[in-house]
Structure formats: C-alpha cells, structure tokens
Amino acid sequence: MLYINSFIYTANCNIFLPISNNKDIDPKIVKALQIMLDTNNVHAKAFRMVRDILKDGPVQDVKLKLISERKTDGRIYNKPTVSEVAALILGDIDSASYRDIILQGQSGNLQRIDEFHASYLGFQYPLLFPYGEDGYRPGILLKYKDDTVVTTRNRLTIKCWLSFRIQSRKYEAMTLLMSRRLFQQFVVDGYAMMESERLNWLRKNQSKLRVGKYRQLNESNGIDKQGQKTIQGKRVVLPSTFVGSKRYMDQLYFDGMAISNVVGFPDIFITFTCNPNWPEITRELGKNNLKSQDRPDLISRVFKMKFDELIKDLTKRRILGKVLACKFYTSTTSNDCP
Amino acid sequence: MNLTHFNLIFILFITVYGDIGDPVWECPQCGALMWYQERKQKSKNSSNPKFQLCCGGGKVQLPLLEQPPQLLQNLLFQNHTKLSKNYQANARTYNAMFSFTSPGMNMDTNTNKGRGPPNIRMQGQTCHKIGSMLPLEGQRPKFAQLYIYDTDNEISNRIGTFR
C-alpha cells in the first residue's frame, strides 16, 4: 500500500544508476572537495579517525557508533562536533538508542538509516551540508519555551522543517538553492521523507481512522472455501484525507458529481498550465543564472499565485459572467511544471 | 454574451499582462523573501503582511545555514570559471562521490525510453543505507568506505565508482 511516485528532471546524469560517461568529472575538483570536507565536515572527520586507527593493522572487534541523539538544543545549534556524531567502540556496546547505527568492521551487510536520524540528510548530501549540519530530528519544539513538554501540537514536523529550509533569505547562505540539480534531488528526497512520516502515522493509527469496516470485508475476501487465509500480511487502509490515495480521488469525483447534480453540467473546462518562461520566473532565475528546472519550489509558488489570480478573476471579478460553482484539481507532470 | 463583449475581453487579455512582481517582501519573523500575493490574509490589503508559507507565521524558529567554505562558495556562486561551470553541471555526481550512504529505492527503468525529459520514477519506500567500515575481500570500496580504505588512491577510487 505504500507508493511514492516522484519525478526528478535530469538532463543526462542519474546517480541511482551507474553513470557511464564521466569525461566531465574533473579530478582537480574532486581533490579540492575532498580537502574541503576533511577540514570542515564532522562526518568525514569521524571516518578519518577510524582510518587512522585501522592504518596500523587490523584491530579486533572495533565498531563505530553513529549517534542519533543530540544533547544540544536543536533550534539553536545545528553544527555538531565529531564526538557528538560518532563514537568508536572497542568490544561490546554498552548503550545505544534504537536509531543509532552500529558499523561493523568488515561485513557485506547494508544497514538502513532511520529517517529521523539527525544526520540522515547530512550523510547523503555532504555538499549541501558541508559542515555536516544536522537535518530534521524528531521531538523538538517549534520554538524555545521554558519547561514545555513536546506534544503533537507544538512539535516540529518534517514539512515545517523543509519549508523553512528551502526559503531564500538575505542573511542566509544560498547553498541549497544554488546547487541546481542536486537541489531537485534534495526536494524529492525531502518529499519522500515527509510522505513516509505521514504513512507511518496512518499505519500506527488505523484504529483511530475506523478502518475496521473495510478490513473485515477484505479479510472475508481472503479466505478460501476451507476457511484458510490466503492473503498474508496486514492491510493498511489509506483514508480519503491522504492526498493521492484512492479514497481521496473517489471523494473528488463524488463531490464533482454532487455539484453537477445541483447546478447542472459544467459549461467550461479550463486547463491552466505553468509556463517556465513567465517573466516573474525568468527575472528571479536570471539573478542567479539558474534554469527553470533548478528551482521547482519557485515555479510551483508562482504557479499557485497565478492560479489563485485566475480563480479570483473568474469568481470574484466575474469576467466570464456569474460563476455558480467551480472545482479544480492540480497535478504535476513529469517535468516539474504543475 | 454578444460578440463585441467577447472581443473586448479578448483584447483586455492580450494587452494587459498581470505581472505579480518580485519577491521583495521580507517575512517579519524569519526574513524569507516572499511575494505580496503569498500573505496570510489574502482578502485584506496590508502594509506589513505576514506569511504562513515560510515559518508558519513565526511558529518555526531554526538556525540559519552558514556560508559554505570558500571553495564551495566559488564553485556555487561564480558563473564564469571553467571549474564552477563543471561543478554546477555535475553537482549530483560530485555529491554522490562524497556521500556516506547509498540511496536505496525501487527504480522504474522503463520511463526513460523515447523522447521527452528523462526522469526518475521510483516505487515503494525510499531509504538510505550504509555498509560496513571496510569492504569485503576483493571488492572495491563504496560510499563511507572510501573515507577509510585505501586512502592513498582515494581520488581515483572515488572517480572509479562511476566508471
């Protein structure tokens, strides 16, 4: 039941598949970047520490713990130190939080990193977070208040974190926004994080969503004549409030039909598409010498404003006459334009 | 609606372009640059608009990003040198060379056939994975292992992962 369909517009390179042509890769840049990360990035420093220990010969039973919890306040400090992100352990592990990653010396196993690990994005995007800054971490308040307990109401969510992060500010570095194609990948990855947080909530709160009705129906379908269960696993039902789910689309359709029932069939059907060459977009991109596919956030924001203007023209200013009812649905095509 | 009425509207449409301006309004709480049309109460005109999109009207307070190291600044913000152009065109490859984890996801490889912009389509849950500290016997170092294993030939190893 878990689906994440995301699209990244790429011209010629694709990091998830092996890249065949690397004529463009300049060893000079690789060398300079490596020196830069060694001096600035805390994760790089931590792994170099391991190298220095293993250099003199194999050490028995050495493990590296990548720590997820931070003692400092997440709203004020996001530049951790080496001892905060990693710890080298000889022998048995005494204490570890369940999100911590324990790296073994030599094994072919891959370990999954929890999305709520504070360095989740720092590990994947060393060139977006060159100092190894912490990314999103759960259980912190929106803003600092003394003696406040973290509840669902004042908790920072991934969506809040991401939308705060991708804004352009006069006094903030433009590292993210200027990284072009890497920024797109970051946006898609961030969206996947957000959606998986939501899906996790739905999976854990099925009883609150009153899905018992649907589940029983499904279970009776999955039982064959001998009374044996044929379908394995537990079914998770996505409610109509989850954007993009089947029930969500069904509800849109039913609403549309109900409106048609009351006010009659639609008279006009408008498809409003985004043009990446709108002067607002080109002016904004031209300042930084970017292309339209480098700033998907900017394009969708301009589209939203233009779209609101169109709806206002039609419903408030009544340029095509009085509007009885209107209904709209936004979808994104494969090349980033709504 | 008669024909002249319709013509009038049509002429209005093509002559007046409704430009929405530039993002010149700073959010009073977090300083993000916003468009006036993105203000919180869209029905009211205000001389000091508040914004919801960036920081939830001041609810979210997080540390701002610091300026990157000088080298990265040169590569990102300069537009004329050969190196910065190269970096900007291949930012994802360079990042993948230095990343500590490998992104694991179900790729749909059927989408990039034919014309149109190439895109990545994935299905299922995404996750980032990390291996052990050292590679197995006879295997090349990958991701975080590049920081530990065979660092004398590190540059060629990093480039070699994409060959």
Image: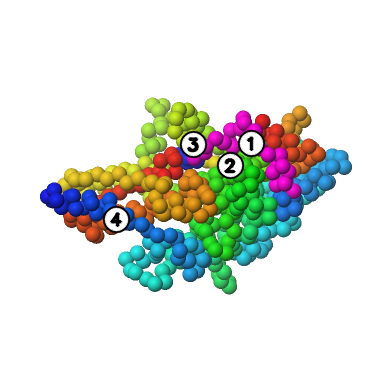
Mark 2 closeness class: few <14, some 14–19, many ≥20 residues within 10 Å: some
Label 4 residue SS = loop
State the quadrant of the N terminus of chain A.
top left
Residue type at mark 2 is Ala
Foreground mark, 1 or 3? 1
Q: Chain of mark 2?
A: B
Of discs 3 and 4, which sits in the foreground? Answer: 4
Name the disc covering residue B89, or none. Answer: 2
Q: Same subunit under labels 3 and 4?
A: yes
* Callout 2 and callout 1 share a chain: no
Residue displayed at 50% across by 63% down = B32
Specify how the rendered protein is coloured: rainbow
Magenta span: A9-35
Magenta residues, dominant SS class: loop
Marker disc for residue A24: 1
Chain letter of disc 3 in the image: B
Residue under label 4: B16
| Labelled disc at residue B119 | 3
Q: Return the x and y of residue A72 as percentages of the image width and height.
A: 66, 63
- Left or right: A119 with respect to A301? right
- Left or right, A173 with respect to A87, comes to left
